[in-house]
Amino acid sequence: MRSAHKPKKIFIASDHGGFALKSIIYSFLKDKEYDIVNLGTDSEDSIEYPDIAGKLCRIVQKDKSSVGILICGAGIGMSIAANKYKGIRAALCSDAFSAQMSREHNDANVLCLGGRVLGEEIAKQIVEMYLKAQFQGGRHARRVGKIPNAY
C-alpha cells in the first residue's frame, strides 16, 4: 500500500564517506519540496560515523513523525550505530523494493545508504520509494512489537 503521505520532517546526515551522496539526496528532496534538515557533515574531512548517527537518532527518537537518512561509505557503520538507539529501526537498503518493505513491513524510521556503493539514480529511487511507503500495521505491527527496544 503506497501512499503520497510525506513524513512531517526528514533529517539527513552523513560522515565523510557519504558526504557527496548526501549532498545529492538533500538537493533532490529539497527540489521535491520535502521539509528536510541537513545535520552535517558538510565536507569530506574525516568524522566519526557513530557521532553523526547518534545526533540524528536522538532527534528522530523525540520527533516520532519524522524520519532520518544516514549515509556513510558502505552504509553498514551507520546502520549498526543507529540500531543501538531505543525506538530506532534503521534499514540499510541498496534497492527500491527493500526500501519499500522496510517501511511497509518493518516501520523503519531511519534509512541507511552507502555513498561509495550506490549510484546517484538508484539512490534517488531508494529514497523516493522509502518516503512514499507507509507502515501497513496489522500483522506487521505485531511482529515489529516483538522486537525489543533495548536489552
Image (spheres, rainbow, N blue to C red):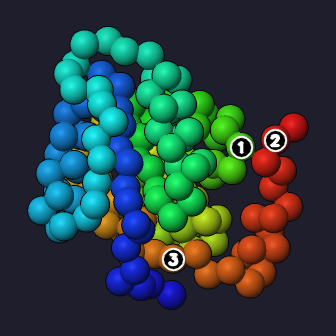
Which numbered disc, 1 or 2, marks the residue that appears first in the sequence? 1
Question: Would residue 25 be found to the left or right of residue 72 on screen?
Answer: left
Q: Residues within 10 Å of mark 1 (few under 14, many from 20)?
A: some
- What residue does disc 1 label? 86
Whether the residues at callouts 1 and 2 have beta carbons within 8 Å, the answer is yes
Q: Which residue in the rendered view is the most extreme toward the top?
A: 46
Residue at 37% over, 55% down:
10
Q: Tag 3: Cα neighbours inside 10 Å, few (<14), some, or many (≥20)?
A: many
Give the structural element (helix, strand or loop) at label 3. loop
| Image location of residue 125, percent across then percent down | 29, 63
On the image, numbered disc 2 is attached to which residue?
Answer: 150
Vertical comparison of 15 with 97: above or below: above
Q: Can residue 118 be seen from the camera position used here? A: no
Residue type at numbered disc 2: Ala
Looking at the rendered structure, the number of numbered marks drawn on it comes to 3
Q: Position of residue 138 (x, y in %)?
A: 74, 84
